[in-house]
Image (cartoon, helix red, strand yellow):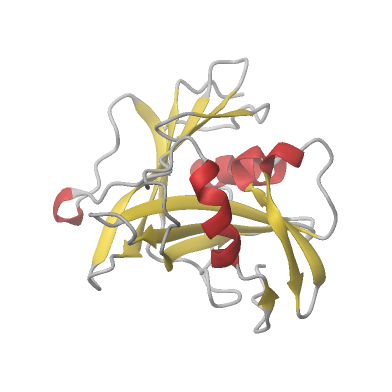
Amino acid sequence: MAVIHRTTLKPTKLELLTSWLPSRPWYRGGAGEPALAKAGGFRLDDPQGEVGMEFMVVTDASGPQPVAYLVPLTYRGAPLEGAEHALVGTMEHGVLGQRWAYDGCHDPVLADRLAALIEGRAQAQDQNVSDTPAREVVASCTGEGHFSRDFTATDDGEGTALTTPQGTTLRLHRVPKPAPDGRILPPQGAVGHVSGTWETPEGTRAAGVFAVLYGAGRA
């Protein structure tokens, strides 16, 4: 289960993201530094208990209109071999010591557990409370069986695509859009998706799609 430690982080997650976000192709801000606030998200459990996984939603109020970003992060106790390009930064955790934070889309453990969430084989966990399901996170999928886990992550101006040689594409909406009236409909052509909620800078709740699965073949 996801265990939440009440402790310090140096630097904080928001401080790491303030430096990292402007380097992403899907970043919508200008030349100035983003003004970030934590707005929501959820966690996933690693069955091996080694990797922390958090899907964080942050809002950036630095531009004319606030923008929400979906940032999946993994936290490891040692560097992930071959993932230097995906390193967000390192932090000193008051309980666990030094932690390496990665863009989770490029971490195979997170990709595997996200697919398991869509398949209905994993449960989204509360972002802030240990051993508590995230009630506002909804995952749906058609059919039965397992998807291929041979994902390759590619970032573009719209988000991140996790693709497999079998034709499966799991696209993450890095800039999630609030659904009109909070009513989330399955995206056209999708065979699965994950949706959730976050808090806007105005203090209201928004709901939108976080990830969409297309063209999946199941085994």
In the orientation shown, which residue stands out farthest toward the front?
31
Q: Position of residue 109 (x, y in %)?
A: 70, 45
In percent of the image, x 50 and y 43: which residue is there? 118
Compared across the picture, whether 199 is left or right of 44 comes to: left
Camera-side residue of 101 and 216: 101
- Residue 123 shows in this picture: no
- Residue 212 shows in this picture: yes
Q: Is residue 83 above or below residue 57?
A: above
- For the C terminus, which image quadrant? top right
Compared across the picture, whether 68 is left or right of 165 comes to: left
Q: Position of residue 77 (x, y in %)?
A: 83, 60
Total marks placed: 0
Q: Is residue 74 above or below residue 36?
A: above
In percent of the image, x 26 and y 66: which residue is there? 205
Q: Is residue 119 above or below residue 138?
A: above
Q: Quadrant of residue 153?
A: top right
Camera-side residue of 210 and 66: 66
In percent of the image, x 34 and y 47: which residue is there? 176
In the orientation shown, which residue stands out farthest toward the left?
181
Camera-side residue of 76 and 28: 28
Q: Is residue 138 above or below residue 25?
A: below
Camera-side residue of 205 and 63: 63
Q: Position of residue 12 (x, y in %)?
A: 61, 70
Compared across the picture, whether 129 is left or right of 40 comes to: right
- For the N terminus, which image quadrant? bottom right
In percent of the image, x 14 and y 55: which residue is there? 181
Q: Position of residue 42 (x, y in %)?
A: 50, 62
